Amino acid sequence: MAFYLLDTSIYSQPLRRKPVMAALKHWHVAGDRNCKVSIVSLAEVEFGIELEESELRREKYRQLLQNRLEVVPTGAEVWQRFAKVKARQQKLGRVVADLDLLIASTALFFDWTVATLNHQDFSKIEGLKWEDWSL
C-alpha cells in the first residue's frame, strides 16, 4: 500500500484561516489511513501554536489534528539517510532546509510520497516521490 507523508504545509491546513481547499480535498481523497505525519511536522505545528498563545487555536488543534494521523518518529535509520541526503544536496548546490530534508529522508527511508505545497524545495531532492497538493 502506498502512503503519503504530509509535510507541514499540508498537515497545518485545517488550522489555517484560509486553507488551500485543493490540499484538503487531496487529503480527504487519500484518507487518513493512507496519510502519516512526521514528528518534525507535528513539532512545527505545535511550535506555531505555542508561539501564537491562542487557546482557540489550541482547541482547534485538539479537535482537528491531535491523534488524527500516525506520527512517524525519526529513528537512527532516518537520521543516517538524512546525512546522506544532506551531503548530496550540498554537493549539488541545492540547499534545502534541514527540517524539510528530515521529512524527505523519512519518506525516502519508508518509500512514501511527500504531500506538500512546497514543491520548490522537495523537487530538488533526488529520488524523492512528492506531489504538489495545491493543484
Image: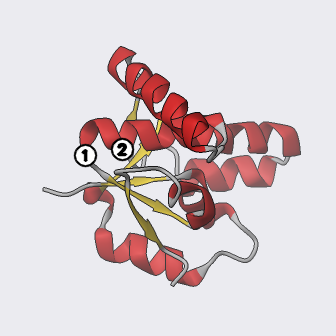
> How crowded is the residue under tag 1: few (<14 C-alpha within 10 Å), some, or many (20+)?
some
Q: Position of residue 4 (x, y in %)?
A: 33, 57
Q: Position of residue 97 (x, y in %)?
A: 67, 41
| Residue closest to the far left | 1
Q: Can see residue 8?
A: yes
Closer-to-camera residue (104/14): 104
Q: Circle 1 is placed at which residue position?
A: 111
- Does the residue at mark 2 contact the one at mark 1 (Cβ under 8 Å)? yes
SS at mark 2?
A: helix
Answer with the quarter of the image where residue 1 lies: bottom left
| Residue closest to the far top | 76
SS at mark 1?
A: loop
Residue name at image x 66 percent, y 56 percent: 60
Amino acid type assigned to the residue bearing label 1 in the image:
Asp
Q: Circle 2 is placed at which residue position?
A: 107
Closer-to-camera residue (121/76): 121
Number of numbered labels in the structure image? 2
Residue name at image x 77 percent, y 44 percent: 48
Number of the label disc, if any, that sits on residue 102: none
Amino acid type assigned to the residue bearing label 2 in the image:
Ala
Figure check: 131 above or below 97: below
Q: Position of residue 65 (x, y in %)?
A: 52, 52
Figure check: 85 above or below 95: above
Q: Is residue 74 left or right of residue 124?
A: left
Q: Can see residue 39?
A: no
Q: Is residue 121 left or right of residue 4?
A: right
Figure check: 96 above or below 6: above
Residue name at image x 71 percent, y 46 percent: 58
